[in-house]
């Protein structure tokens, strides 16, 4: 088990084939760099798909993991642990939220959000108010409820029957949303930026007006900030840019910088409906995950201002890639989609990897970048140069 090729061959013999994996096995990481099993170095501008916000093996996260790893890992939610309480306090501090539920992934955070949205209305004597309205092309995870709410049919095939009482409206379309809302609506769920759909930002003012419509209809306004949260867009939560607050929000991905953790945050009134026994997760908010997340959250708050400047430089560099194949850059902060034409995004990703750069293709014409918030200016410039070279090297398409 040493080189990329032999690890890939063995993987293909034993793992389920659900991932389209590159023939590369990564063995070590530091900051924005990773190394593969053949010793090749890469600049990582995808960082676990927006997970390693502090880069790989950040000293603060490593310290928290080691210290907590020697003290206590897990005791079940029959007991309190101090790090989980501190983490919840720091998450609610300065945010819309007053109540926090911990879990282990984005899908689970969304499951909790969706279940809670229904329960709030059921508790109020309106079990008929159970419909979830979500957006076309959204992504909310792969558990059955989160999958049903995900507005991409290609992910539904083979898994029917899905969860009843879910409908989709076009993202950004307020008239369609207003039409869909009614006395049966439990909640509207939306991402501030549809990341998996190709880094599509919500139109200006959309979230605020959607929130108003949703509340006027007596439903809950729910944000999926699994990918956009934890500093990814330049503020701790993307909704802060829009001056709107949700009733419930999901977080995961960067929450513990790569240690699995998710969280559902809610207002006092809504969060209190998750009554004793109504929901649970064995590993939710375990001492180890909480300690790493706490260190991650504190460090992210500290690095955010500097990250904003590097993100601007990166965006400007990407926008100025010559050759006419880059037709635009969209997104915010360290979540960027580079739109290409005349080449296939997938071919660019392969050419980039050959040049020592890790990025990710969404469809045929968007290259997603989700770099670490600790990316340096020099690394941003290097990333732009490598991507420019990969784009010009990729074969032309008709
Ligand atoms: C990644 C993602 C999820 C799913 O998270 P998992 O940890 O893979 O379950 C849900 N919503 C959004 C917006 C995501 O980006």
Image (tube, rainbow, N blue to C red):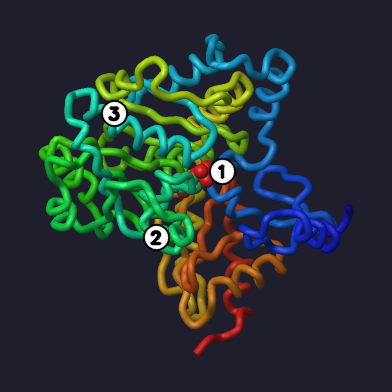
Q: Which residue matches tag 2?
A: 152
Image location (x, y in percent) of residue 353 = 68, 65
Image location (x, y in percent) of residue 32 = 65, 48
Residue under the point 18% across and 52% down: 177
- Relative vertical location of residue 121 with respect to residue 173 in this rendering, above or below: above
The answer, for residue 257, to whether it is visible in the render is yes
Q: Is the CB–ligand 1 distance for label 1 below 8 Å?
A: no
Looking at this view, name the residue that lies furthest to the bottom.
398
Q: CA distance from mark 1 to mark 2?
A: 22 Å
| SS of the residue under disc 1 | loop
- The numbered dot on residue 119 is 3
Residue under the point 46% across and 30% down: 263
Q: Which residue matches tag 1?
A: 51
Label 1 or label 2, whichever lies nearer to me, is 2
Residue under the point 42% across and 18% down: 277
Give the left or right position of residue 8, taking residue 194 as reference: right
Q: CA distance from mark 3 to mark 2?
A: 26 Å
Judge by depth and name the residue closer to the eye, 303 or 142: 142
User: Reading the chain from its start, which is encountered first: label 3 or label 2?
Assistant: 3
Residue under the point 61% across and 68% down: 349
């Amino acid at each position: 088990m040493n080189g990329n090729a032999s690890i890939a061959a063995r993987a293909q013999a034993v793992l389920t084939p659900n991932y389209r994996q590159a023939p590369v096995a990564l063995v070590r990481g530091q900051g924005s760099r990773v190394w593969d099993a053949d010793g090749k170095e890469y600049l990582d501008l995808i960082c676990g798909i927006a997970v390693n916000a502090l880069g790989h093996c950040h000293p603060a996260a490593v310290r928290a993991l080691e210290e907590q790893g020697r003290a206590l890992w897990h005791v079940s939610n029959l007991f309190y642990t101090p790090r989980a309480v501190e983490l919840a306090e720091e998450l609610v501090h300065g945010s819309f939220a007053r109540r926090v539920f911990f879990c282990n992934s984005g899908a689970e955070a969304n499951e909790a959000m969706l279940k809670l949205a229904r329960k709030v209305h059921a508790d109020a004597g309106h079990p008929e108010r159970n419909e979830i309205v979500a957006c076309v092309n959204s992504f909310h995870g792969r558990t059955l409820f989160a999958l049903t709410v995900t507005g991409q049919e290609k992910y539904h095939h083979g898994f029917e029957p899905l969860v009843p009482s879910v409908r989709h409206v076009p993202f950004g379309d307020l008239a369609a949303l207003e039409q869909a809302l009614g006395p049966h609506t439990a909640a509207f769920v939306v991402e501030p930026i549809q990341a998996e759909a190709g880094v599509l930002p919500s139109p200006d003012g959309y979230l605020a007006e959607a929130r108003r419509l949703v509340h006027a209809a007596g439903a809950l306004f729910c944000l999926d900030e699994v990918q956009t949260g934890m500093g990814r867009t330049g503020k701790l939560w993307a909704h802060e840019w829009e001056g709107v607050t949700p009733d419930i929000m999901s977080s995961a991905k960067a929450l513990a910088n790569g240690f699995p953790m998710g969280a559902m945050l809610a207002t006092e009134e809504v969060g209190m409906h998750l009554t004793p026994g109504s929901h649970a997760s064995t590993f939710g908010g375990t001492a180890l995950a909480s300690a790493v997340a706490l260190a991650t959250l504190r460090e992210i708050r500290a690095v955010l201002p500097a990250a904003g400047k590097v993100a601007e430089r990166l965006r400007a560099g990407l926008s100025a890639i010559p050759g006419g194949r880059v037709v635009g850059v969209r997104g915010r902060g360290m979540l960027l989609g580079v739109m290409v034409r005349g080449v296939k995004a997938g071919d660019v990703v392969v050419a980039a990897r050959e040049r020592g750069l890790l990025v990710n293709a969404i469809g045929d014409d968007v290259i997603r970048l989700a770099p670490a918030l600790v990316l340096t200016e020099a690394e941003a410039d290097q990333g732009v140069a490598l991507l420019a070279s990969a784009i010009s090297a990729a074969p032309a398409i008709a």
